[in-house]
Image (spheres, helix red, strand yellow):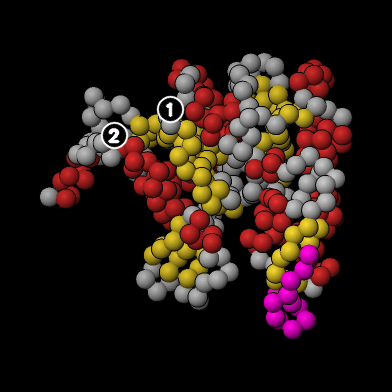
Amino acid sequence: MLQILDWLRNIPIPFITNFKVYFDLGTSTTRIAVKDKGVVLKEPSFLAYNSQSKDYIFFGSEAKNILGKTPEFLKIVRPIVNGIVSDFDAETALTKRFIEKSISPYTAQFSFLAPPLEALAVFPIIATEIEQKAVEEVILKAQCSSVTLIKKPLAVAAGCGFNVFSHKPNLILDMGGGLIEISIVSGGGIVTNKTLKNAGEHMDKLIANYIYLKHGVMLGEATCERLKVECFNFTGQEKVSLVRGKSLENGLPKSVKIRTDDIREALLNNFIQIVDAVKELIEVSPPEVVDEIFDSGMYLTGRLASIEGLEKFFSEELKIEVVKPTHFADAAIYGLSLLDKEKDTIYKIASYSRS
């Protein structure tokens, strides 16, 4: 009987409107939004695998919170690496759990026949055709009935408030956990693009290495991420954070005071590399594009855009106005919801659509 009910639920019913869901499967964070409801889930892209029971038992924040504190039979899995699906089964399990957690409250009213889930998702521009296919298959296996893939820079541009079909070029610097994507968007496409892998998670490692060498203390990944977010800034304001790690001298816990200058010294060269990449992108762009870009400025998105004073830093280094849009942290998924309102045009920029 249960099998029959499951079969009936999956039959498309003409009078039921498809339920629109938007996905940003990020390296550090997974974001899910529902049409007309906004972002309904924002959780770490982590899960824990139990090698004894052969299944996944913790997801999202629960898994991230036990990072570095698990017994041998529990392995913390990061299924997305540099924006690409690296563990298909793990990412499918994670996405399925997140859908159940975030979408179920909105579909519970359909007690017998759940509406089909129609998905729109972003993928990084460096993804190969096979890697794009992996994103599509993950979402379909997570119980969505159809999926349309959009290049992330286009969705981010829409999230910044741009008309992506306009022929006015816009420069966007999207700084995520796994990738930094620098793009010039115009005419419904990407004029030029440059992708770096020295993003948020790479910066956490730079902080860990710096503290290791300067203070002789080993810090965990979560602690380094907290230092980057809470202690680091480009405003000149000096902050101090007391952290505890493992002493290299005797292996015992050791507390050290970390200052803003420490984090700045650890990360400054990394940010200079980003500046250089933006300059290189501008240098290879057509003169007409460069002229208009310097009129409109550069738009800064992604979670790293929350670093205080970052706009001023880039503006001084690049000699260009830098703008942080309202939805800077969720620009991609917010952009998908805006693009979806233009049903006749979204398929013009879709890289793949399958139902």
Question: At 45% from the left edge and 65% from the top edge, which residue is drawn?
Answer: 49
Q: Is residue 33 magenta?
A: no
Q: Can you tell which quarter of the image residue 137 is in?
A: top left
Tell me the tag on residue 353.
Answer: none
Question: At 65% from the left edge and 40% from the top edge, which residue is drawn?
Answer: 302
Figure quadrant of the C terminus? top left
What secondary structure is found at the residue carrying circle 1? Answer: loop
Q: Is residue 283 left or right of residue 67?
A: right
- The amino acid at mark 2 is Pro
Q: CA distance from mark 2 to mark 1?
A: 16 Å
The location of residue 18, given as percent across then percent down, is 33, 29
Q: Is residue 32 visible?
A: yes
Above or below residue 296? Residue 317 is below
What secondary structure is found at the residue carrying circle 2? Answer: loop
Nearer to us in this view, 306 or 53: 306
Nearer to us in this view, 216 or 338: 216
Which residue in the rendered view is the most extreme toward the bottom? 250
Task: Give the residues in magenta.
Answer: 246-257
Question: At 48% from the left edge and 59% from the top edge, which residue is drawn?
Answer: 62
For disc 2, the marked residue is 115
Q: Are marks 2 and 1 in contact (CB under 8 Å)?
A: no
Q: Is residue 145 visible?
A: no
For disc 1, the marked residue is 36
